[in-house]
């Protein structure tokens, strides 16, 4: 009479530690993370290394949990559940490791099968390898049943279990190790929460029955603690599982994708627990580390020890986009560090995240090393001058620059005072007050004097400008500027006409005066000057007094870079127009290094209107050196004669022309250094040297 042996059962949990494969942290924080041994950031970084480390994952998860929930938290390697001080239980079934247990009844049954005896020996000595492990027992039949020994209601699950078997087949001789491995294969299929191999003696031999308990069907989801994780992302991740038996392998993939969402955005967050409740409800627990406090710590430039800083902490803190109560993002922190560095008053900046006690939050400490505030500088040579600068006036990042430069022909004296962020303004508006007295060559418009004489344009300018971001990548500037300008001969005497008797002022006096309302909007695609860019500028002369000039001047520039394999195509277009009464020396000068190459500065034309287009292809040569081929075209659109006195017509400027050529470009701290050789449509050749990309 066949009977069933219930004395030995082989049980395995289906839940195991999922592979944790987050992306590496932002490179900027690599050094910070390794220095911060006790911070949450270091713990997450260490979890990132778990796939390459021999340290058990549970030990790292225990450490992370202790920092989030306190020392009372304990994680067991067999069940991985966290118990807090308030006796609340948060289960981690998804993170559980496979476990073996032995259930042996107190009664002994006669006729106990050889396989059952070997199973018992294996369970009692799980780490030993004996000769009995390799002894084989003939199995006549292999079945899959439920925990009550009855057939499964769902045949597809029975098929899944049988498909998972590798060694256990009817009429096969099996070892204990092979049965154990097949039990794990059934569990690893993900559809079952338990599996017990039971050996039953029958008249035809030993029948091996795998008693399995399928997982529940998925009928709902509860997600707790996810404040920044999009609801739609979670819903989409679980959508294809509704109404189906929960598959732990698929659930593991979903958890990995959620953790990956946090890591891709540099957020301090992860799935901390998963529990399958009665009724097929999955409870998902997410731990997000919010920012508790942000503090500034000044470090000495030489010793690295904490010191007293000159900058007001609130001046730095208002630059940060990271705020209290937000889930801390390493990517956002990196942008904050870059923002503080662009203030120009810091030599080094770093952020150290640290656990805020047992609150599950993080405190951020920003270490800053201040640069010297400024001072005097002087220079000599072809041009000489001096400058005084202070980049952190009153500890508010306000900047004062006073400079005087004198060359053989030109000179400039300038006072600039800039507040990069007006106090009390939430739109990051900056204010600049400037006073300037300059003298520049007038050759662009009134050059090529037959008597080899030269003239200069003197300008006294004073005004105020306000700038602020309008939207991402867009900024705007408005200002009010007063200008007093006029022409002077080589001896510095004021003149009102050039050699051709063309007027040099619009008013007919020695000086023109104007009050200009300025508006400018700038779009920059990225920090790379060779990327996309658009600038629109409008100036309106306001005739507050009858003798002040009344005009409107618009100017626009656009640039677009396109990658073509290793080469780069850069296209640029600029144009402008003036309406009203304006000074002749303010006409648009066409030709030169930043206009039409192959011509001298302003040699193509001087117009009331203009259009200049350019195309160039650059390609790498050796290290920082690039080769360039280019072509330019410019025209005054026939507007030269409309400029007062027609200075272009008197000098026989063609009004339009093109140039082409080749050159090299070398990267430098000042920007690209350009050396170019160009030909124009008049068969003339000319070298050009410039710094930065052409306008």
Image (cartoon, rainbow, N blue to C red):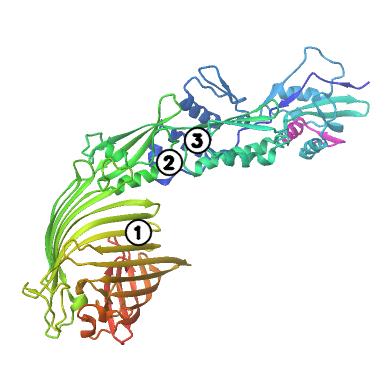
Crowding at mark 3 (Cα within 10 Å: few <14, some 14-19, many 20+): many
Contact (CB < 8 A) between labels 3 and 1? no
Q: Which residue is rendered at x = 33% and y = 79% of the image?
A: 637
Q: Where is residue 540 in the image (x, y as percent from the top left)?
A: 26, 63
Which one is in front in this view, the residue at disc 2 or the one at disc 1? Answer: 1
SS at mark 3 in the image = strand
Q: Residue 269 carries which label?
A: 3
Which one is in front in this view, the residue at disc 3 or the one at disc 1? Answer: 1
State left or right for residue 532 relative to residue 254: left
How many numbered circles does the render carry?
A: 3
Contact (CB < 8 A) between labels 2 and 3? no
> Which one is earlier in the sequence, the residue at label 2 or at label 3?
3
Q: Residue 522 carries which label?
A: 1
SS at mark 1 in the image = strand
SS at mark 2 in the image = helix
Residue in front for this viewpoint, 523 or 387 = 523
Q: Which quadrant of the view contains residue 368? A: top left
Q: Which residue is rendered at x = 39% and y = 73% of the image?
A: 616
> Which one is earlier in the sequence, the residue at label 2 or at label 1?
2
In the rendered view, tell whether residue 189 sits above or below residue 489: above
In the rendered view, tell whether residue 652 sits above or below residue 520: below
Q: Which residues are the magenta region?
A: 168-186
- Which residue, given by chain and number where applicable, does mark 2 sit on? 330
Q: Which quadrant of the view contains residue 659? A: bottom left
């Amino acid at each position: 009479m066949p009977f069933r042996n219930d004395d030995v059962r082989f049980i395995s949990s289906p839940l195991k530690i999922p592979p944790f494969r987050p992306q590496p942290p932002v490179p900027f924080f690599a050094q910070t993370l390794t220095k911060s041994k006790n911070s949450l950031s270091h713990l997450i970084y260490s979890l990132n290394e778990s796939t390459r480390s021999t340290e058990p994952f549970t030990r790292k998860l225990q450490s992370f949990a202790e920092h989030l929930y306190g020392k009372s938290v304990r994680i067991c390697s067999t069940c991985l559940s966290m118990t807090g001080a308030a006796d609340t239980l948060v289960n981690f079934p998804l993170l559980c490791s496979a476990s073996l247990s032995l259930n042996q009844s107190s009664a002994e049954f006669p006729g106990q099968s050889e396989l059952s005896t070997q199973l018992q020996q294996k369970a009692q000595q799980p780490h030993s390898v004996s000769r009995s492990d390799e002894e084989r027992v003939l199995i006549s039949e292999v079945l899959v049943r439920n925990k009550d020994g009855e057939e499964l209601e769902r045949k597809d699950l029975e098929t899944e279990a049988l498909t998972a078997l590798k060694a256990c087949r009817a009429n096969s001789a099996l070892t204990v190790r092979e049965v154990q491995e097949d039990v794990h294969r059934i569990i690893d299929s993900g559809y079952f929460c338990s599996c017990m191999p039971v050996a039953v003696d029958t008249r035809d031999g030993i029948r091996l029955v795998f008693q399995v308990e399928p997982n529940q069907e998925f009928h709902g989801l509860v997600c707790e603690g996810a404040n920044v994780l999009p609801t739609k992302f979670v819903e989409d991740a679980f959508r294809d599982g509704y109404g189906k038996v929960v598959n732990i392998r698929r659930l593991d993939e979903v958890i990995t994708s959620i953790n990956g969402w946090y890591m891709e955005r540099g957020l301090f967050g992860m799935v901390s627990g998963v529990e399958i409740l009665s009724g097929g409800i999955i409870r998902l627990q997410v731990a997000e580390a919010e920012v508790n406090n942000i503090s500034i710590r000044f470090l000495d430039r030489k010793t690295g020890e904490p010191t007293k800083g000159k900058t007001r902490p609130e001046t730095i803190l208002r630059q940060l986009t990271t705020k209290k109560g937000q889930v801390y993002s390493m990517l956002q922190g990196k942008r904050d560090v870059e923002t503080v560095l662009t203030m120009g008053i810091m030599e080094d900046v770093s952020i150290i995240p640290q656990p805020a006690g047992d609150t599950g939050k993080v405190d951020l400490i920003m270490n800053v090393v201040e640069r010297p505030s400024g001072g005097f500088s002087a220079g000599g040579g072809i041009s000489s001058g001096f400058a005084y600068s202070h980049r952190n006036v009153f500890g508010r990042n306000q900047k004062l620059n006073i400079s005087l430069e004198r060359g053989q022909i030109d000179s400039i004296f300038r006072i600039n005072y800039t507040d990069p962020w007006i106090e009390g303004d939430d739109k990051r508006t900056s204010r600049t007050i400037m006073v300037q007295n300059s003298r520049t060559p007038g050759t662009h418009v009134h050059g090529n004097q037959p008597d080899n004489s030269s003239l200069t344009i003197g300008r006294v300018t004073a005004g105020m400008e306000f700038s602020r971001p309008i939207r991402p990548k867009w900024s705007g500037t408005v200002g009010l500027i007063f200008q007093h300008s006029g022409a002077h001969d080589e001896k510095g005497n004021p003149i009102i006409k050039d050699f051709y008797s063309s007027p040099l002022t619009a008013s007919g006096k020695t000086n023109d005066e104007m009050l200009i309302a300025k508006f400018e909007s700038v779009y920059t695609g990225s920090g790379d000057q060779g990327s996309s860019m658009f600038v629109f500028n409008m100036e309106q002369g306001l005739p507050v007094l009858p003798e002040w000039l009344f005009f409107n001047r618009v100017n626009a520039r656009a640039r677009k870079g396109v990658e073509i394999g290793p080469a780069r195509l850069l296209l640029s277009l600029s144009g402008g127009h003036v309406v009203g009464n304006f000074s002749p020396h303010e006409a648009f000068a066409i030709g030169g290094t930043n206009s039409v190459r192959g011509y001298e500065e302003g040699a193509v034309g001087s117009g009331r209107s203009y259009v200049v287009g350019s195309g160039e292809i650059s390609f790498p040569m050796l290290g920082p050196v690039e080769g360039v081929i280019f072509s330019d075209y410019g025209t005054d659109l026939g507007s030269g004669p409309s400029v007062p006195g027609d200075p272009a017509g008197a000098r026989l400027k063609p009004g339009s022309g093109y140039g082409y050529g080749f050159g090299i470009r070398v990267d430098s701290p000042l920007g690209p250094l350009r050396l170019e050789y160009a030909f124009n449509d008049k068969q003339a050749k000319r070298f050009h040297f410039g710094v930065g990309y052409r306008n």
